[in-house]
Amino acid sequence: MTALYPDSDLYGFAELLADAERAKIEALRRLLDAELRPVLAESWERAESPVHLLGPLRDLRLVDDPAVLDADGRARELYSGFRVFEFSRVDIGVCMLYHGQVAMFRELVRRGGSPEQAEVWDSAILSFEMTGAFGLTEPDHGSDIARGLETAARREGDHWIIDGRKRWVGNAAHSEYVAVFARDVADGEVKAFLVRTDAPGCSLTTIERKVALRLVTNSDIRLAGVRVPETHRLQRVSSFADVARLFQPLRADVAWIGAGAQAGAYEAALRYALDRRQFGRPIAGFQLVQEKLVRMLGNVTASLAMAVRLAQRRQDGVSREEDSALAKVWIADRLRETVALAREIVGGNGLVADSDVARFFADAEAVYTYEGTREINTLLVGRAVTGMSAFVR
Ligand SMILES: Cc1cc2nc3c(=O)[nH]c(=O)nc-3n(C[C@H](O)[C@H](O)[C@H](O)COP(=O)(O)OP(=O)(O)OC[C@H]3O[C@@H](n4cnc5c(N)ncnc54)[C@H](O)[C@@H]3O)c2cc1C
């Protein structure tokens, strides 16, 4: 059988996939190659989210086909990782578009909601009848959101009244709900509410002129006296510790995003180097170009190794905050380096979105910052290894 990633998976990590898992990844590749690649550069330039793909993606049943589920109805961590890898190898934005729904929003509801809430909503989320995003960050609170979260929730009978602002909420513009994290004014604890984006008092404004992840629409959200029924409060979120618990697996996904985007950039740079001729021969034949290619391939391979091992440990039930934080920091650093080298190999053409490296070059900056910045994830690992918290002087 030919390798799934003959150019970028030198050590054959994808051989760890079962046949049915590999078949799903190949089906995804066919869809993205046919429906997304031809319009990718233009969509990116126009900052258009390819929401038309959500129907065909849902129909592929990448996350709920029994062929890729175990007896408990769960997909293997390794398969979920390679699914993210495959998406990100094409475009990080389209990965966020799909996984924002089936991984992020779904997991928040599944693990943050009561068993009854999860049961009722899970199938609706998988079928995209119920669409959602999450709103944690605020205009004045990003890294310090744990302490600084200002959005307020006040209970009135069987409803809550939400007031505040959220920033950067990805996919909200085309979602029915946003999982809004707000502080209960009665006990000071952070709780989570499924707010309808069309609820009276809820207004969304698209963040314009964004230079990264242009395929994702990010919104500023204003909440002014928005009413949410108690039935739409996620019942298993009653403190910020619960919020941190919910977000930890999402950070592990970022490791796969970083590895996949590096693979995409590397493959594009390799193709270009083999094709582009200067001084009478392909630039791939020059030592200084090969040095860059090898550095990139080393980064992709090491990032994949880290992501795969993280997935295996998570499959075995080992899920520590510092493990995913270390992967996020380290792979995001490698990502930044790899996309810069890819951009360099493609020369001036690497500044044009059609080259297939410029998008990765720009989008890497978003990966570097979201799901905890480099500094915040470093501080998480630092606290774990030293036993000392250095978040605040
Ligand atoms: C493309 C994109 C999509 C996003 N999607 C979402 C989303 O869907 N939902 C959502 O809720 N949020 C989302 N975010 C928000 C994201 O989580 C925040 O941007 C991130 O947490 C950082 O917050 P900030 O941008 O306010 O930076 P700040 O927290 O203001 O940080 C600015 C700088 O200060 C550094 N810094 C802060 N504190 C410390 C410290 N103690 N020690 C050392 N350095 C420090 C940071 O590392 C950073 O370099 C998204 C962001 C981006 C860019």
Image (spheres, rainbow, N blue to C red):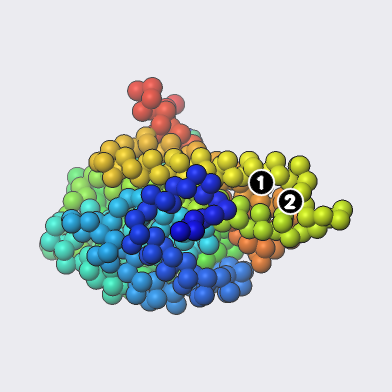
Residue drawn at x 46%, y 55% as measured from the top left: 85
Using the numbered discs, state the Cα–Cα distance from disc 1 to disc 2 in whole angstroms.
9 Å
Question: Closest to the observer: 225 or 261?
Answer: 261
Q: Quadrant of the C terminus?
A: top left
From the image, tell me which residue sits under label 2. 284
How far from the left and from the top, in percent, is residue 169?
A: 42, 60
Describe residue 275's horizontal placement relative to residue 146 as left or right: right
Residue at disc 2, secondary structure: helix
Disc 1 under 8 Å from ligand 1? The reply is no
Residue drawn at x 76%, y 42% as measured from the top left: 287
Contact (Cβ within 8 Å) of mark 1 with mark 2: yes
Q: Amino acid at mark 1?
A: Leu
How far from the left and from the top, in percent, is residue 315?
A: 28, 45
Occupied quadrant, residue 387: top left
Residue at disc 1, secondary structure: helix
From the image, tell me which residue sits under label 1. 293
Occupied quadrant, residue 63: bottom left
How far from the left and from the top, in percent, is residue 269?
A: 66, 55
Question: Counting residues from the N terminus, which is met first, the one under dot 1 or under dot 2?
Answer: 2
In this view, 10 is above or below 378: below
Q: Residues within 10 Å of mark 1 (few under 14, many from 20)?
A: many
